[in-house]
Image: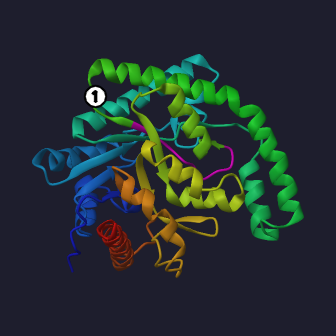
Amino acid sequence: MEKADKGDYSFSTCWNIKRHESGAAMIEEILSLGFRNIELNYNVTFDLLRTIEPMIERGDIAVSSVHNTFPFIDDPDYGTDSVLLGFDDETKRKRAVELMVRSAEYADRYGAGAVVVHPGEVPFDYDADGELKRLYADQGPASSAYRARFLELAERRIERSGVYLERISRSLEEACDIVAKRGYRVVFGIETRARFHQIPTIAESASIIDRLGGAPVGLWYDIGHGMMMERMGLYENDATLLAKQGKVAGVHIHETIGLSDHWCPYVHSGNNSYFDRFLPVIEAAPIKVYELKAACEPETIEASHRMIVEKLAVRAKERINEASRR
C-alpha cells in the first residue's frame, strides 16, 4: 500500500542501506514510504551511486543533504567516530578537510542544501562513553557511582576540549573558504552526537558557529542524540536549543528509548507527549530528515509521521487563533 506523500520531509538511507546491493532499489523502497527527498548517508558507496545518480538527474528524487564523509571511504580515520577535523597530525587534518569539501562538491552537484558533519571528539585512552553507559544501565543515572564517575570524566572532557574545538573551527573555516571560492551553495551542519566524548554539545556548536562569523556553518540538531546526552547529564536541550534555533541548519528526527536511538517518535516509546518539546525545532529547521533504524516498519514510520504533522498543524492553528485575538 502506497503511503501518503511526505512533502518537504526527507528520509535517510541509513534505514535500508544494509539490505540493498542496488542503489536504485534502496531509493525505490524509500519512495514507497511517500518520501521524495532523500539524505544520502555516509555508507553510500560509488557502486550504489551508479544507479542513484540517474534518478537524481531525472528528478525522481531530490537530495536534501549528504552525510560526510561522502561517498563512503573505507578508512576509520575519516569515519563517523573519529577525531577527524581535530586531528593533531596536520596531514590527517588536511585530508579530513579535503574529504569534507568533496562531500560538499557532491551535495552541490545534487542540489542538496547541506552536508551533515560529525566534526570530531575529545579522545580518551579508553572507552569512557562505554563505561558511563554501562554504569547508567547497571546502577542508573541517579546513583552515586554514576554521578561521581560522570563528574570526573566531564571535568577531563572540559579540560581537553579546547584544543580540539580550536582545530575543528580552523578546519571548518578552511573548508568554507574553499567552498566559497568554488561557488558551492551548501551549508555544513555540525551534528550533535551520541557519545559522551564527541563534539559538539549544543554550547560547543554555538561557540564554533559564533567564531566563524557568518560562514555557512550551522547546528545539525540530532534529536535522538540530544535526548541521550541529556539523560546522561552532558547538557539539557530545552532552553539552550530554543535559543539557538536561528542557527539550526537541519534536524535528524528520531526518538531515543533509554539510551537506544533511531526509533520512531511517539510510536515506539508509547509516550504521546514527551517528544512534543522538540516540535519547535522541527518546525523551524530548514531541512527535516528522518534518521531511523532498520527495525522501524513502514506502518510505524507512517503513524509516527502522521502524529508529528498533526501536532505541528495544531501548533500553527493555535498561533493563528492567538494572533487573531490580539
320 falls in the magenta region:
no
Q: Position of residue 133 (x, y in %)?
A: 73, 60
Point 25% across, 66% down: residue: 6
Q: Is residue 290 visible?
A: no
For this view, does 120 lie left or right of residue 285? right
Q: Nearer the viewer, residue 308 or 23?
A: 308
For this view, does 107 lie left or right of residue 225? left
Q: Position of residue 97 (x, y in %)?
A: 47, 25
Question: Image quadrant for the N terminus?
Answer: bottom left
**Amino acid of disc 1:** Tyr
Q: Mark 1 falls on what kind of element?
A: loop
Q: Nearer the viewer, residue 216 or 122?
A: 216
Point 55% across, 39% down: residue: 205
Bounds of the magenta segment: 188-197
Residue 264 placement: quadrant: bottom left
Which residue is denoted by mark 1 in the rendering? Answer: 184
The color scheme shown is rainbow
The secondary structure that most of the magenta stretch takes on is loop
Toward the front, the furthest residue is 326
Point 37% across, 76% down: residue: 307
Q: Position of residue 308 (x, y in %)?
A: 38, 71
Q: Height in image: 291 above or below 84?
A: below
Q: Is residue 246 visible?
A: yes
Question: Image quadrant for the C terminus?
Answer: bottom left
Q: Height in image: 267 above or below 224?
A: below
